[in-house]
Image (cartoon, helix red, strand yellow):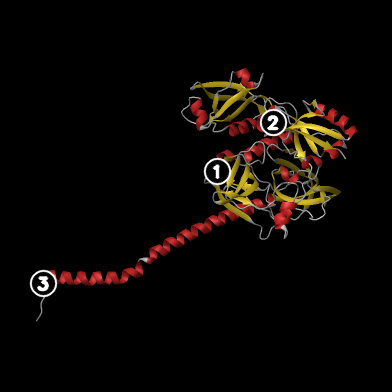
Amino acid sequence: MRTYNCTQKQAIWQFFLLSALLFVLPFISPLPAFGQADSRIEALREIGKVFAQIAEKARPAVVQVLVEKSATSYDLEIPNWPFVQPHPGYFGGPFDFGQGGPFQRDDDSYYYFFRPQEPPLRLPQPKSYQCCEGSGFIVSKDGHILTTGHVVEGAKTIKVKLADKRELEAKIIGTDSETDIAVLRIDADDLPFLELGDSDALAVGDWVVAVNSPFGPGHPFSGGMVTAKGRSGLGLATYEDFIQTDVAITVGDGGGPLLNLNGKVAGINVAVTDKGPGGRVSFAIPINTAKFVYEQLIEHGMIERGFLGVSIQDVSPDMAEALGLKDAGGAVVSQVVEDSAAEKAGIKRHDVIVELNGRPVTSANELRTRIALLKPGTQIEVILLRDGKRVTFAVTLGRRSPLRQPVAAGPHVLERLGFTVEDLTPELAEHLGYKGDRGVVVTKVETGSEAERQGITAGTLILQVNRRPVKDTGDFNRAVEQGGKKGVVLLLVKDKHYTRLVLLQLK
């Protein structure tokens, strides 16, 4: 008879236990993985529910802005060219590779080598009206609405469609082209409205929700994340300090709210681009900027901005080395305006401004924007580097000259010239690169006008009219009126590249 000692029995039991464990383990080990996956999926569901709740709560205060604008349609006058008919996509430039351009034709090569040398003329047809739309949101019980300025620019009529399907006439309380913000008003009471938050408290990585047009299919909204702050250089406004996000906005969503997780407005959606490093990115105006504009337009009907009185630029690594600084950053003063707040405080050329009111200054654009959101008479503390040493200055901001409304030489000459102008202020000279020049700046050029065909664009500086220097819109007005009688105006103009003469035939 076979017998086993204790050691042998323990070994046998260990063998059976290990075998059983190896057999059962494949069936047991997936359970925690499935459990973890379920919990993660549930977390994502909860995030989606939070976004939906925020959008649902905000939606009654989000409106559709319907704008009717006057527009001029143009036809092409074919030049006297016996063989080749110019393609409508060609407007006088040497190349046009865009959709519908001349290189889309069957006779591409013939057209390219034998096209007429003078551009075809576009003849204005009777004015018609075009309709466009955007978004906005109600910010007070009595019907004040925030939206973007470009949505209502040139509006003939404005209607606002509410979430309850009511459609009401709206009037413009005021606009600020320098921040692209507009305030509207509808005649209604006890309206739902959104509470304005604090965009300074918004951080990169924070979740945000954009409520899109409330009248699209399914009442769309989109959630995303703040991917950058302080974005500038986009050419959308004079003062740019945009919030960059990855939320999805489309045409018609401009002017709608960007909400934080508390359901408060953190920004106004303004633009979208496909040129981001990760694909499509969206931009929003910080709501703190909108608050400043909104309060002043409601109270004064215009914007009063503080004026420091310096021309500034970024401190690059090379500039920092030249100035004897350890690090780049801040804004270096290149010019101090005579009798300005900066000069009175003792700020000088070559000073590098590194702090404003206890907050670091990282760039010239940031400093300009922060000063522009302060009222005249505001006391500020400026810390700068002078010869490598930190110096503190107390400054009382002056009053920035308000932008004049675009003017023209007369009621009929504007139509014949095809553009409007305004005075060249120190601020415009700084932004456009016209320091030391005198003249008037073109603000808008009519599509198809003689001025457009001659290469005049918004931002062109007009130095002389009929060989007479012009220092302001008054000089321009008188000079053009006199030239208009002769049917011709000779302009000396300047852009960023060169100065040239332009002869405009007034027809």
Instruction: Classify residue 40 as left or right of residue 462.
Output: left
Q: Are marks 2 and 3 in contact (CB under 8 Å)?
A: no
Q: Residue at x 54, y 51 (%)?
A: 278
Mark 2 and mark 3: Cα distance apart in space: 102 Å
**Residue bearing the label numbered 3:** 5
Image quarter hosting the N terminus: bottom left
Q: Secondary structure at mark 3?
A: loop
Instruction: Classify residue 286 as left or right of residue 175.
Output: left
Q: Depth-wise, is mark 1 or mark 2 nearer the camera? A: 2
Instruction: Classify residue 324 as left or right of residue 176.
Output: left
| Furthest residue toward left | 1
Q: Secondary structure at mark 1?
A: strand
Name the residue nearer the viewer: 462 or 336. Answer: 462
Q: Residue at x 20, y 69 (%)?
A: 14
Q: Position of residue 182 (x, y in %)?
A: 72, 41
Label 2 or label 3, whichever comes before in sequence order: 3
Q: Residue at x 51, y 30 (%)?
A: 318
Q: Depth-wise, is mark 2 or mark 3 nearer the camera? A: 2
**Residue bearing the label numbered 1:** 228
Give the vertical position of 43 relative to 205 (above or below). below
Q: Position of residue 330 (x, y in %)?
A: 54, 30
Q: Position of residue 15 (x, y in %)?
A: 21, 71
| Furthest residue toward right | 485
Checking the image for residue 46, the label placed there is none
The amino acid type of the residue labelled 2 equals: Leu
**Residue bearing the label numbered 2:** 428
